[in-house]
Image: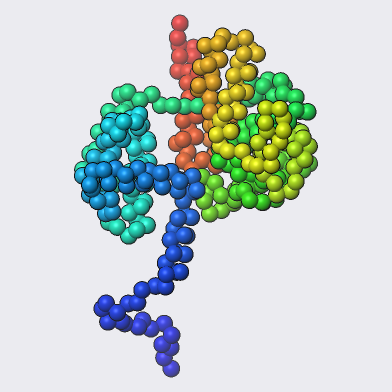
Amino acid sequence: MTDNSLAIIEHPAGTELALPDHLVEAARDFQREALAERTRQTYADAWRLFLGWCSTMCRRPLPASPQSVAGWLTELATGADGKKPRSAATVRLYLASVAYMHKINGAEFSTGHPEIKAAIGGINRTKAKTDIPRRAKPILADDLRLMLKRFDPLKAGDARDGAMLALGWSGAMRRSEIICLDWERLGEGMGFVRVDDRGVEVTLMVSKASQDTATVIAIPIADMPAAAEWLGHWAKAANLQSGEPIFMQVSRVGKIARERITDRTVSDRIKVRVGAYGRAAGKTTEQVEELVRQSSGHSLRRGFCTTASEKGISLEVMASHTRHASLSTLKAYIDTANKWRRSALKDVGF
């Protein structure tokens, strides 16, 4: 007896029916969800710029010719559009957005085309001669410890910032991860935090390095009591309810709004706290301004990595905690720290 259930049914050429609209749209939704929300937004913004440029230049955006894309990238890099010249990294990101939009629309496009490849290569080489890499100044453990000592846990603003700094630093967290956290269980965010006798447990449903698998970050109370302590202060001050956003807006007079902070809030509060810390340490106005300028939302994550490196924590142990998708990025923190801690001039220089 022959089983024909697996037989391939041949259809005459050109007779394949179109899929139902709802299936096509659902498939596109899943394709869009393959990227992080922040990446989707960045790609969308870049694509709008490209569409506007194509309209002005009377060029076809989809499928775009290599000449059009190379010309647009050149305009971005040189600032010929009247805006500040973009960095090489930004130009590459915008190129990726064009490639992505072609891909999801089924249009042919290759970033490896000789004309595009040559343009990107030239931009990279030219920018390397003038662009100084921007790196956030790390907030090291000793500095954070002293900074937190100046906070009053009974004041809502201090309690919120103390929890945000302690958790963000000890969890080596990105701004996008900090702002998405809910209290005790998942609400409308993309992760949640629980505190028990063991310490703090952070669950990220999605993250930059893991788009399809939840990630758990453990912050043992024996190793980092400040994280649990300041979360407790803030939970009490804000009367946090299960499922609510952890980090909420706080006015200058200490009034708490039941709305989630933005990634801009994280950067702004770090700059404010670093500035106050610098002034308290007796630094000059110019020194404080420079500290604030160099600080950003990445200062917490970079601060943890740099401190761990200085303490001799291995790359593998660090990577399991920081959730770096690429070890080369993490290694850059270690190399920077080792230049001072393990100088080749030790016992050699004079």
- The answer to whether one can see residue 92 in this image is yes
- What residue sits 50% from the left and 29% below the top? 333
In this view, the residue in front, 222 or 194, is 194
Name the quarter where the N terminus is drawn. Answer: bottom left
Q: How far across and down, in percent of the image, does residue 272 sit?
A: 60, 23
Up-down: is 222 above or below 310?
below
Indicate how the structure is coloured in the image.
Answer: rainbow
- What residue sits 47% from the left and 38% below the top? 327
Instruction: Give the farthest residue toward the top.
Output: 350
- What residue sits 53% from the left and 12% below the top? 287
Name the quarter where the C terminus is drawn. Answer: top left
- Side of 29 relative to 260 (left or right): left
Number of dots carrying numbers: 0
- What residue sits 77% from the left and 35% below the top? 237
Q: How far across and down, in percent of the image, does residue 99 sit?
A: 33, 49
Q: How far across and down, in percent of the image, does residue 348 sit?
A: 45, 11
Q: How far across and down, in percent of the image, does residue 52 sit?
A: 32, 44
In this view, the residue in front, 267 or 215, is 267
Up-down: is 291 above or below 97?
above
Up-down: is 60 above or below 139?
below
Instruction: Give the farthest residue toward the bottom.
Output: 1
- Side of 56 relative to 292 (left or right): left
Q: To which quarter of the image does residue 152 belong?
A: top right
